[in-house]
Image: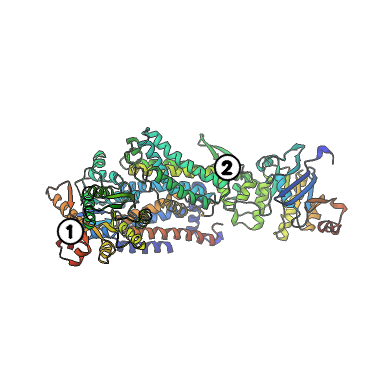
Amino acid sequence: MTPDTVLLKISGVQKHFGAVHVLRGVDLQVAPGEVIGFVGDNGAGKSTLMKTITGIYRADAGSVLMNGDDITHLVPGQRRSLGIEMIYQDLALARQQDVSSNIFLGREPVKRAFGFLPGFVDKAKMDAEAQKMIDRLGARIPSIHRPVGMFSGGQQQTVAIARALTFNPKLVIMDEPTAALAVREVESVLNLIRQMRQEGIAVILISHRLNDVFEVTDRIVVLRQGQVVADLPTAQTKMAEVVSYIVGAH
Amino acid sequence: MRMLRTIAAFSMIAAVCGSAAAEDKPVYGVLMKTLSNPFWGAMELGVKEAAAEKGVDYYLQAVESDQAAESQLNVCNTMLERKPLVMITASINSTNLLPCLKRANEANIKVVDLDGNLDPEIAKKAGVAITFSIGSDNEAAGAKGADFVASKLGKDAKGPVLVIEGLSGNITGQKRARGFANRLKEVAPGLEIVASLPGDWDRGKAANIANDVLTQHPDLKAIFAANDGMALGAVESVFAAGKGDQIVTVGVDGNSDAVKAIKAGRLTASVAQLPYLVGKQAVEKVAGNLKGEAVEPFIYVPTLVLTKDLLDAGTDPQLKFVK
Amino acid sequence: MRSEMTAPARTWRRLQFFFETKLHVRMESLVVLLIFCAVMTWLSPFFLSRSNFANILLATSTIGVLAIGATMIIASAGLDLSLGSMLGLAGVVGAAVAVKLELPSIFAVLGCLGAGALAGFVNGILITRLRIPAFIVTLGMLGIARGLALIIADGKVIYGLPDAVVYLGQGRPLPDLPMPVIIFIAVAVVAHYILAYTRFGKHTLAIGDNEGAARATGIPVERMRLYLYTISGLCAGLAGMLFMARVNSGDPTAGIGYELTAITAAIIGGTNLFGGRGSILGAIVGALIMGVLQNGLNLMAVQSYYQQMAIGAVLILAVYIDQFQVQRGRKP
């Protein structure tokens, strides 16, 4: 990996909550189109690190660089516009809103109603784009006008994925995307990841399911007690080795 | 479907509880403040009996508290829809019903000010014509209270006196307090009003006020409250402090609670307003006026000081108007 | 599920869909309003007349404006218990400005709106900066604003408002169109537009639906909450001005208990008490349902105690219907 092909560079990031030091100096690099498996035991700091990347948390020390620019102090909205998207474990959907409202949440397109009233959300445009994205993902959703809370878990996740992909992201972080899915749905998520790699979108996959990690990732990074303890190319490691890093037996 | 049935059922109940106006008899609209004070209950009784005597129908409404000014205005507007011949109203403050009463004027509905709640100056300025105002002379009632205190304690008595006023800004309360204060100065100059505080017609508030003032002035000689509810509240504080036999307590209204308290020896006296008579005469006079009889603009119904002796003797002819 | 529906059920569903997605109001609420009107027409010969409808709208104006503020707050999963007290404070401030300071009418109006907005702003600051729960803050403001109103008015009612102010409450540009109704409708239209069709509105609903999701998508949650509580105060200020102008006095006891009525109107109209779903138009319909009920019962001379029971029953019924639909899979 040469310096100009680094998409995301995290150096020495630390984060503590009161007296609890969750991240103790994390270094990580992600290249465009790379799929990284991010693993570690509960409490290792995986979610915290991801939230530091998306901007929900601000790092106490260290830096986060995107394409060479320092984004450590940017708020989530700004980081989204730079192409960083995340699909949360709880999906972070507004369950009483419909599909297009969720996909465009926070960045709804506006137009002038009747030619002069300002700030009118362009629902027609939102609905059209949302339908396109849902079709592209090959998902079967009964109607994009229903509140998403009425959909099944897998369908809701499709909406969350659609939200992450609609604005041409460069990096997508997926937090336990397959944890609650049926076998067929898991396979479609893995296929999606492969497709994203083909389109040059980098993916950070947080998962407990090491089988999935071994199937789609290029590299596996192990986080333990707030520090990166291993950064291995997937092809050159085995599950037992990864597990031993996770539990600290290495 | 289920919902429709529930609504229909409730409407049936509501219809039974309400009263539809008969089309052939003349109809009067009566709007009171709230029905929770027995004073207004007695007034309604007077209205009811006079209406029966004169062969008129009436519908009576009140609101949930005597502070709900806007609600009362809304109810008044609604009552106009039934096009009564007369609107007899006891307004919560001096202005809240005026817009409605103006519309009554415009619809040729006569307006009667029940119990003198309207300020005639303010009403005139707003262009509202009142056929007549009937009530007790509240200033005279306050004065009678002062006379009673002087008679009980003696003209040369000295000491502190507490006055508990009505709802702030309410003209009835103001008149009673003023009547009492002015008269007391004349008949017992040694008695000094050390505090004159608004009790808002509220029993609890009055109890607290009495308590506080008693603490400051343990040698309190008398308490005058602008209505019975507040007087009874003050009485509780007085007895709780063990001064039941040392302090003269006087209320105004003469309602049934006060009568019981006087007979039981707790409240010393009440200047009975004879609300029964007010209600009765309001209907009688306006019925006469509708037939063409002249009527004075201000009608004062006499008051009667109720004491234990008077009630026990039971011979005073005006007692039959105390309900 | 669709194959089991009969043709009328399908039409019903299609209508429901239209009302919800295009007009942003629950069709059930409108149907209930119509049913109540029908029942009242049947029960009282005086109900169906232009002047009576004007009465209903007039009587609903003050609560309606308050319900607009309540809806915005509840939709964002907030709570404002101080609405009635802010109304009272605003009315007293406006009256004091006109009568005691003897300033022109425009300042009385600004006084009302300003007092309400300021109180709402204070609520917002305490809730978003000091992180005190909204229930506590607005409960405190309920007492503080009411006490302040009584202090400013010295416990009395302030009389003698100037004609221009009184016109706002009692003027009738058209015989059956009183000024308060015009003001109420204008504010309702603007507020409905904002909540249903603008980004601000969508973000408000998102915050109420899932605050974490809103934050993650970059919505400035604290700033929005501050705006919303200020807007709520502004609505209370406007309602206070309408009250003051209608009864032609600055009454420190104005609006006692009104916050509960406003919240009831919002919920009857389909706003989710826990946030995430709300409609201004729905709140208006909810307020009108209560207004029709009270008006009808007044026309039949039913005592106000029964009216209070009736409104309580309607509220429970409305929420039950909502739950009923949740169980049948109609909404989340």
Q: Relative to residue C263, is residue B120 depicted above or below?
A: above
Tag on residue C88?
none
Name the residue located 49 percent from the left edge and 47 percent from the top edge. Answer: C23
Furthest residue in direction top, as rendered: C104
Q: Which residue is mark 2?
A: C223
Viewer-side residue, C328 vs C135: C135
Q: Kindly tell me whether residue C184 is visible in this rendering.
A: no
Residue B233: quarter of image: bottom left
- For the C terminus of chain B, the image quarter is bottom left
Q: Pinpoint residue C183: horizontal percent, then vertical percent.
A: 40, 40
Q: Pinpoint residue B63: horizontal percent, then vertical percent.
A: 32, 54
- For the N terminus of chain B, the image quarter is bottom left
Q: Dot 1: what SS? A: helix
The amino acid type of the residue labelled 2 equals Arg
Q: Dot 2: what SS? A: helix
Query: Dot 1: few (<14), some (14–19), or many (≥20) neighbours within 10 Å?
Result: many
Say if labels 2 and 1 share a chain: no
Q: Is residue C332 left or right of residue B138?
A: right
- Letter of the chain that mark 2 sits on in the rendering: C
Residue B42: quarter of image: bottom left
Q: Is residue A208 left or right of residue A118?
A: right
Q: Which residue is mark 1?
A: B50
Query: Dot 2: few (<14), some (14–19), or many (≥20) neighbours within 10 Å?
Result: few
Whether label 2 touches label 1, CB < 8 Å: no
Viewer-side residue, B24 vs C183: C183
Q: Pinpoint residue A197: horizontal percent, then vertical percent.
A: 77, 46
Q: Kindly tell me whether residue A49 is visible in this rendering.
A: yes
The amino acid type of the residue labelled 1 equals Ala
